[in-house]
Image (cartoon, rainbow, N blue to C red):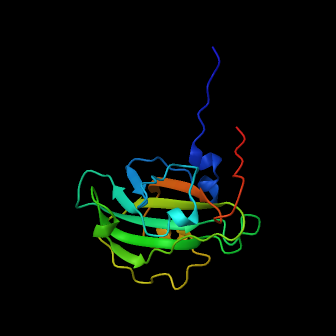
Amino acid sequence: MPRTTIMDPLTVGGVIGDVVDPFVSCVSLRIVYHNNSEVVNSLELKPSQIINQPRVDVGGDDFRTFYTLIMVDPDAPSPTHPNMREYLHWLVMNIPGTTGTSFGQEIVGYESPRPIAGIHRMVFVLFKQMRRQEVIHPPRWRNNFNTRDFAQVYNLGSPVAALYFNCQRESGWGGRRIII
């Protein structure tokens, strides 16, 4: 009987490695933009579809448990020369479980992605917090943010969920090639 291998889209898309280390997803995360475009791993969305911040629903089993959501672009300013990796697009902390980002504390406001060259991965990473947290040192700039370092400073541990989509300039063509 032939063996079927199912590849994790976060691994195939390079999110595991470029942004986070391997982890086990254990909390549901649903992200929907206002045009009803739900974020699904490796889906392509155009800049005109993602102008406004999305609605984010965080799972979990208790609203007394808190989460941190980070949105980054590991391909800034271009996938061939990502010298601004990771570009921070959004940071929300203290999101109560079973709710969404509108109930959390926005640390860095949503900035709509506007890639200028190549196909960019827009990555959402969700962390479970040990407790409600105060942000002592919010990021001073968006360029060269590091999800792993931020998680370490705030003792967030491994991610509990992640999603990503691909985005290129409005007149872009082609797509990220995935070879299985």
Give 89 or 169, whichever is nearer the viewer. 169
Residue 154, by quadrant, is: bottom left
Residue 48, by quadrant, is: bottom right
Q: Residue at x 47, y 46 (%)?
A: 24
At which x and y percent is residue 4? 61, 25
Residue 87, by quadrant, is: bottom right
At which x and y percent is residue 53? 43, 68
Q: Is residue 86 left or right of residue 53?
A: right
Q: Residue at x 47, y 57 (%)?
A: 158
Quarter of the image where the N terminus is located: top right
The vertical placement of 148 against 13, above or below, is below
Number of callouts: 0
At which x and y percent is residue 64? 22, 61
Give 75 or 131, whichever is nearer the viewer. 75
Q: Residue furthest front?
A: 171
At which x and y percent is residue 162? 48, 54
Q: Is residue 81 left or right of residue 39?
A: right
Residue 19 seen in this snapshot: no
Q: Residue furthest top?
A: 1
Quarter of the image where the C terminus is located: top right
Residue 35 seen in this snapshot: yes
